[in-house]
């Protein structure tokens, strides 16, 4: 069932349908087409392709033992890339695992992003977090928590402060389908509605929380419908459709900027790869299921559309691939050779000023030889 | 002024001075909190600064972190320290680690206020003293005042400190503790203990150091009075800031007396007393004349009917003083 996004944002459909723009043949449904300017779509495509390549390279590096871990978002690129394009510079982003790349769209340097994966001295976070847990104040993006869910009420709190400040900023808070079982999701939805906070809460339903299917997460017909009980206008959108995601997020953000409060978005998508480099999905799902979703790949769908409207062709695709490949290779080369963070930086930033125990322990570490490597 | 009024005074003063300060929590607005600590703030500062929230500690603390990230200075109230656990992850995994995990880019400055301790017929959900569960977490500061003067000064200092502070308010003495509190602005420095009773050891006349805080400070004082009648002097240290603890003042006192007792309401095993005794052993081993002693809550859940037997009251501290002095 296809819905016009204004209607879905007014929450007029009791069944919570699926908002889609891109049709199978690559054309945009005229009834729902948000008419995004072509250069913006080409930019979105570039970011999606870059992310696809980046994820593939990072997983390869992990397999080669050059980085410790990685969580890719392959098959889910439309959501973070659309968010990055919709968010304004003074908006804040509270991602979950599959939305780290929003920061890249908003201007965070790829070099620092990759340095976070290596955890070396090029990393803004000083090597303190596992790979795939970046943050960057320059683009107002906060780190997610591996505990799953804490960032959602934090997004609501930031939005609440934005409302007090009476500016037009918006907070975007993300979760996966698994996080909707957490108390933090419930708290976030409750507080967002009660305080009419300018927040867009997005759940990427990728069908799997590691090995547990969404059907085991909830007996609710959809995740979007949960928003209704909290009094939050909610929409279920095709998360593999860049045009649909862009339209829904932009309208949700506009609602928030106008002081109309929160919107809840369920983005229906699929995790094509493993949960992380530590996961083996063949133990819990079939190849046929994965193959069926590969046919709905968000990058391919946008490519089909752009070809149809004549915005890309074989030559431009090849050029794009070469450019992105060279950029990523160059960044990896430059970052990989950076030294680890200084040992004694371990004790910085626990408090604004180190307490006496940290000063003592820093002296202790300084006096002993470096630990053996892994 | 009593302790409640002193805390209220500090909040009012800082809210006037700093527009970033926002009080939020369950029942903190119109009714002024179940202990009336925030009474009058909503009338004066309104809905934007004093916010009655939904009943969700995780929501209160999670949203407070978001507010703090955006630049406000939230003062969430957790109605009883016993209720803090639904929001524990937000404190332990998020608040405490925010500055460190972001490489120093972000911080979430806030003061979490919560009433703590037993002796008010509150049973296991209104009586606990969970301070060690927060002291154990790198990145938090933990404060517990024992009188109105310190409460106001420590709260103002906590609000202006750059790090997140857990501010434990000993509810048993909320109204019983009274004293002069200066009008206007002053702070009591964090990380500084206060010697509330001095003692000198002399040959044949042993003295004992007692470390205490919050409501149990008064039990220590009462026990010390009785001990004096038996010829034993006690030096009593009110820790005031539990973390970072004033290890220098503690060590100086123990080096002087050679004998030390730690008193706390929380269960003995892995309570803060365990850390204090370890610090004393590390720093003062050669000065010790007797084994350090802990007089603490028992390793049971906090009881309702038998709470006075559970608490380390003066009648339990006194024999420990005598035994330590005679060791």
Image (cartoon, coloured by chain):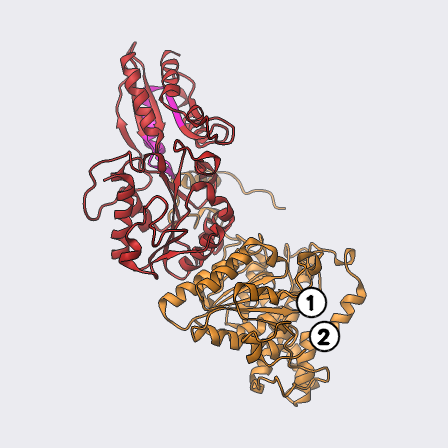
Reply above or below: A365 against A278: above
Q: Visible in this render: residue A338?
A: no
Reply above or below: B64 against A163: above
Q: Is residue A58 left or right of residue B142?
A: right
Is residue A128 one of those drawn in magenta?
A: no
The hue used for chain A is: orange
**Residue A239 coordinates in the image, percent (x, y):** 64, 72
Q: Visible in this render: residue A5?
A: yes
Q: Nearer the viewer, residue A6 or B295?
A: A6
Specify the farthest residue to the top.
Answer: B204
Earlier-in-chain disc, 2 versus 1: 1
Q: Which mark is residue A296?
A: 2
Q: Are marks 2 and 1 in one subunit?
A: yes
**Residue A210 coordinates in the image, percent (x, y):** 69, 56
Is residue B244 one of those drawn in magenta?
A: yes
Q: Nearer the viewer, residue A185 or B43?
A: B43
Q: Which mark is residue A270?
A: 1
The hue used for chain B is: red
**Residue B58 coordinates in the image, percent (x, y):** 49, 51
Give the magenta-colored segment's residue range.
B238-263
Chain of the residue under label 1: A
Specify the farthest residue to the bottom.
Answer: A310
């Amino acid at each position: 069932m296809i819905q016009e996004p204004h209607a879905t944002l007014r929450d007029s459909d009791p069944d919570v349908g699926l908002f889609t723009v891109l049709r199978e043949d690559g054309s945009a449904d005229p009834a729902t087409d948000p008419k995004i300017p072509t250069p913006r779509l080409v930019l979105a495509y570039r970011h999606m392709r870059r992310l696809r390549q980046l994820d593939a390279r990072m997983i390869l590096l992990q397999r080669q033992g050059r980085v410790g871990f990685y969580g890719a978002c392959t098959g889910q690129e439309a959501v973070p890339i659309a968010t990055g394009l919709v968010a304004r510079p003074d908006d804040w982003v509270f991602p979950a695992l599959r939305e780290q790349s929003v920061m890249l769209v908003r201007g965070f340097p790829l070099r620092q992003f990759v340095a976070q994966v290596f955890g070396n001295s090029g990393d803004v976070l000083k090597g303190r977090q596992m790979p795939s847990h970046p943050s960057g104040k320059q683009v107002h993006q906060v780190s997610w928590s591996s505990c799953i869910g804490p960032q959602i009420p934090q997004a609501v709190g930031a939005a609440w402060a934005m409302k007090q400040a009476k500016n037009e900023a918006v907070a975007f808070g993300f979760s996966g389908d698994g996080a909707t079982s957490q108390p933090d999701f419930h708290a976030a939805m409750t507080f967002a509605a009660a305080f009419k906070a300018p927040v867009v809460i997005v759940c990427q339903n990728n069908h799997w929380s590691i090995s547990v299917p969404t059907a085991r997460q909830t007996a609710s017909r959809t995740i979007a419908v949960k928003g209704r009980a909290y009094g939050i206008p909610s929409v279920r959108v095709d998360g593999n459709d860049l045009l649909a995601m862009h339209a829904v997020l932009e309208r949700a953000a506009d609602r928030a900027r106008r002081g109309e409060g929160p919107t809840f978005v369920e983005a229906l998508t699929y995790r094509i790869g493993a949960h992380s480099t530590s996961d083996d999905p063949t133990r819990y799902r079939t190849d046929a299921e994965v193959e069926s979703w590969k046919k709905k790949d968000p990058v391919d769908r946008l490519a089909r559309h752009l070809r149809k409207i004549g915005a890309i062709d074989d030559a431009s695709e090849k050029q794009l691939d070469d450019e992105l490949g060279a950029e990523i290779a160059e960044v990896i080369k430059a970052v990989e050779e950076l030294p680890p963070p200084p040992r004694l930086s371990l004790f910085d930033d626990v408090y604004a000023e180190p307490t006496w125990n940290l000063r003592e322990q820093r002296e202790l570490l300084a006096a002993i030889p470096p630990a053996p490597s892994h | 002024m009593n302790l409640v009024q002193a805390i209220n005074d500090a909040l009012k003063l800082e809210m006037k001075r700093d527009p970033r300060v926002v009080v939020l929590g369950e029942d903190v607005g119109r009714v002024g909190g179940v202990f009336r600590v925030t009474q009058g703030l909503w009338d004066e500062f309104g809905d934007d600064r004093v916010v009655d929230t939904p009943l969700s500690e995780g929501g209160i603390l999670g949203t407070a972190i978001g507010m703090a990230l955006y630049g406000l200075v939230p003062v969430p109230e957790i109605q009883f320290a016993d209720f803090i656990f639904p929001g524990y992850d937000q404190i332990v995994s998020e608040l405490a680690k925010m500055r460190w995990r972001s490489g120093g880019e972000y911080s979430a400055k806030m003061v979490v206020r919560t009433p703590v301790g037993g002796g008010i017929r509150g049973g296991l959900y209104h009586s606990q003293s969970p301070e060690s569960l927060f002291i154990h977490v790198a990145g938090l500061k933990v404060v517990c005042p024992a009188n109105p003067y310190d409460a106001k000064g420590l709260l103002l200092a906590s609000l202006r400190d750059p790090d997140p502070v857990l501010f434990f308010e000993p509810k048993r003495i909320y109204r019983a503790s009274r004293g002069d509190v200066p009008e206007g602005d002053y702070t009591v420095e964090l990380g500084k203990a206060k010697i509330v009773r001095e003692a000198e050891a002399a040959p044949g006349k042993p003295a004992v150091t007692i470390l205490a805080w919050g409501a149990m400070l008064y039990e220590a004082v009462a026990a010390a009075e009785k001990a004096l009648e038996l010829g034993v002097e006690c030096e009593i240290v009110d820790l005031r800031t539990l973390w970072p603890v004033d290890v220098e003042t503690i060590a100086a006192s123990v080096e002087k007396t050679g004998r030390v007792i730690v008193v706390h309401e929380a269960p003995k095993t892995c309570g803060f007393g365990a850390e204090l005794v370890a610090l004393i052993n590390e720093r003062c081993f050669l000065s010790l004349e007797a084994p350090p002693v802990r007089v603490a809550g028992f390793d049971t859940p906090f009881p309702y009917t038998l709470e006075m037997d559970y608490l380390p009251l003066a009648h339990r501290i006194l024999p420990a003083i005598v035994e330590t002095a005679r060791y």
